[in-house]
């Protein structure tokens, strides 16, 4: 009996340690191939050059060209999702009737359940032609429409997580503000949002991390041209869509092209890892505050 | 007086803005679904579902993609569920508040935030190249399993946490061992929550494209996978490929395939919500 119990505990422990192995695996794979990559390309060129042309005959390896595309689309997405998501969160928490909130929240969350390849198709076939009506110089592949659609996708991240944070604020704070004659608007912005600020910040950080790692929308709608630019109307390439481009072809193992996707992946991983770690610590601190 | 009026106007303006934005979110959903239905609905037929992919858009179908998706999901379920639920049980019931458990916790929360394409690179490095599985359905399902593991673990933990301690204490008082308590008391009463998490994680996996492209899923597979080591295609991969083709006919085919994919996703989410509601009522 005792042995069986111990054995089960051991098996369960092994299951849990697979998650550790996954992290080790990710870091090992990214580092291993990146080290080979940096034997042929200097880190200095990688970090400072502004051209990224590993698939051309004249090769340049400036990650800035991919990073500018990555941050451009992510910035557009956040510019769309943050004001809309936060306003929805405050509206649902402070203004909407109770039943309304309960039905609307899952409805908005459907937006997050739609596969990203569907959003990519939506951006390319509906949003881009629509934007071209307004601004005819917009190219077929562009950062603007990919960024906007990505923003729509992450609205529910911000609205749901921020609403949870607002919901967790002790009721007494809200009632005290009302008791002093504040309007809902004043209560929301002078009491609730500051009190829930750490939770709201966490939701925004997670949304940013999600946006820079998003792949299919940009791969379909933003083009395949790595350009060091902040012009949202022309085709760009992000780290993720570069990895897709190389993977869709047939890069032989050990070739420099094959290694570039791991070096690019490592760069992406470092960014999302830092963002996730920051949000984790804020979340930990914030939980303690209310317990 | 003037100030009060100003504040009231601000209050009402913001309320209107909130309603507008909420309505905006919902209407985007409606526009998206409407446009895809408008373009793709007429293309859906039994032929579309049972035809092989083709270079001619009018003849192309999703047979290999849909069978590939089903096979891939089946394998992912086999790999991910036991490990995910097992890890969840360990973290909630066994690991004490030790250094190891807080390390596991930070690690899982981080894994949940790793972009899916990075999991693709992991799968490429480990399963495709190192274990030499090639761009096979085995490599694809192992990669997806690792991707959804954090979701299953977190859902399992939440579900186990929600089981009233009195149930467990009663079981221990009857002389049941730890595992007996877990297997005959904790798991049955957290089943609804765990199954909700599993279905949601699968609905995420079914729409994943990026990691599978990296692992080597193909858009044109003229046969259904017969073994674990065969090449495969999946529905989102097929959609991606069709969206990159210039011919108008492929956009129609892509819309039709999206209708099928969305249908599957929504049905899975619906089932998950149903299980969650039933389980939450039962717990109360």
Image (tube, rainbow, N blue to C red):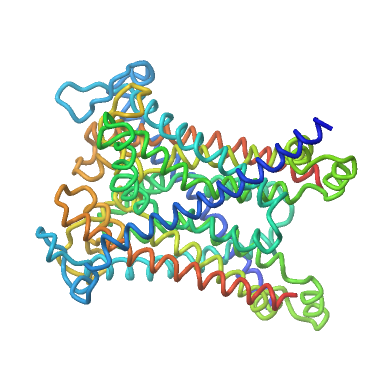
| Left or right: residue A208 compared with residue B72 | right
Q: Quadrant of the C terminus of chain B?
A: bottom right
Q: Which residue of the protein is positioned furthest toward the front in this rendering?
A: B1
Q: Residue at point 22% right, 52% down?
A: B241
| Rendered position, B59 above or below B124 | below
Vertical relation: B169 (above or below) A146 = below
Q: Name the residue: 24% across, 51% down.
A: B243
Answer whether residue A3 is visible to the viewer in this image: no
Q: Nearer the viewer, residue A62 or B59?
A: B59
> Where in the figure is residue B159, as x and y percent of width and height?
65, 67
| Residue B69 position in % (x across, y down) | 32, 66
- Image x and y of residue A97, in percent: 70, 58
Front in this rendered view, residue B193 or B50: B50
Q: Is residue A104 left or right of residue B81?
A: right
Residue extending furthest bottom? B174
Residue A163 higher or lower than B54, as above or below:
above
| In the displayed structure image, the side of residue B97 where residue A217 appears, left or right | left
Q: Could you tell me which residue is drawn at 77 percent across and 71 percent down?
A: B164
**Residue B20 visible in the current orientation:** yes
Residue B58, percent across and down?
13, 64
* Residue A242 vs residue A258, the one in the foreground: A242
User: Considering depth in this image, is B256 or A64 the residue closer to the camera?
Assistant: B256
């Amino acid at each position: 009996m005792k042995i069986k119990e111990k054995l089960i505990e051991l098996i369960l422990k092994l299951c849990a340690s697979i998650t550790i192995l996954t992290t080790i695996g990710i870091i090992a794979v990214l580092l291993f191939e990146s080290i080979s990559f940096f034997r042929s390309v200097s880190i200095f060129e990688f970090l400072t050059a502004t051209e990224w042309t590993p698939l051309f005959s004249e090769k340049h390896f400036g990650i800035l060209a991919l990073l500018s595309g990555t941050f451009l689309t992510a910035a557009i997405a956040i510019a769309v999702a943050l004001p809309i998501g936060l306003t929805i969160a405050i509206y649902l928490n402070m203004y909407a009737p109770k039943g309304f909130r309960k039905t609307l929240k899952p409805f908005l969350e459907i937006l997050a359940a739609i596969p990203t390849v569907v959003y990519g198709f939506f951006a390319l076939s509906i949003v881009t032609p629509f934007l071209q009506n307004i601004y005819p110089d917009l190219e077929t592949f562009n950062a603007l429409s990919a960024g906007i659609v990505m923003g729509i996708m992450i609205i529910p991240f911000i609205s749901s997580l921020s609403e949870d944070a607002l919901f967790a604020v002790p009721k007494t704070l809200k009632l005290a503000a009302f008791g002093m004659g504040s309007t809902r608007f004043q209560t929301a912005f002078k009491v609730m949002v500051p009190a829930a600020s750490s939770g709201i910040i966490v939701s925004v950080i997670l949304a940013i991390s999600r946006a820079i790692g998003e792949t299919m929308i940009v791969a379909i709608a933003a083009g395949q041209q790595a350009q060091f630019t902040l012009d949202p109307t022309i085709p760009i390439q992000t780290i993720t869509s570069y990895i897709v481009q190389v993977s869709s072809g047939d890069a032989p193992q050990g070739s420099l092209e094959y290694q570039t996707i791991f070096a690019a992946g490592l760069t992406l991983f470092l960014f999302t890892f830092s963002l996730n770690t920051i949000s984790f610590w804020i979340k930990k601190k914030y939980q303690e505050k209310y317990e | 007086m003037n100030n009060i009026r100003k504040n009231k106007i601000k209050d009402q303006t913001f309320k209107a803005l909130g309603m507008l934005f909420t309505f905006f979110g919902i209407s985007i959903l409606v526009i998206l679904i409407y446009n895809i239905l408008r373009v793709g609905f007429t293309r859906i037929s039994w032929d579309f579902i049972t035809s092989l992919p083709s270079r001619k858009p009018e003849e192309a179908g999703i047979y290999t993609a849909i069978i590939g998706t089903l096979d891939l999901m089946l394998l992912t379920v086999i790999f991910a569920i036991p490990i995910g639920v097992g890890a969840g049980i360990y973290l909630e019931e066994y690991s004490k508040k030790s250094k190891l458990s807080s390390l596991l916790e930070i690690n899982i929360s981080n894994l949940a935030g790793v972009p899916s394409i990075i999991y693709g690179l992991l799968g490429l490095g480990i399963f495709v190249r190192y274990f030499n599985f090639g761009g096979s359905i085995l490599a694809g399902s192992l990669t997806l399993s690792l991707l959804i593991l954090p979701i299953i673990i977190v859902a399992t933990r939440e579900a186990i946490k929600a089981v009233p301690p009195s149930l467990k204490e009663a079981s221990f008082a009857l002389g049941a061992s730890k595992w007996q308590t877990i297997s005959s008391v904790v798991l049955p009463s957290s089943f609804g929550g765990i199954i909700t998490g599993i279905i949601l994680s699968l609905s995420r996996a079914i729409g994943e494209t990026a990691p599978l492209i990296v692992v080597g899923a193909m858009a044109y597979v003229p046969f259904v996978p017969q073994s674990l080591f065969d090449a495969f295609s999946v529905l989102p991969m097929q959609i991606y490929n069709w969206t990159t083709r210039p011919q108008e006919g492929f956009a129609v085919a892509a819309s039709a395939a999206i209708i099928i994919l969305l249908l599957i996703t929504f049905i899975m989410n619906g089932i998950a919500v149903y299980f969650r509601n039933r389980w939450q009522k039962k717990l109360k």
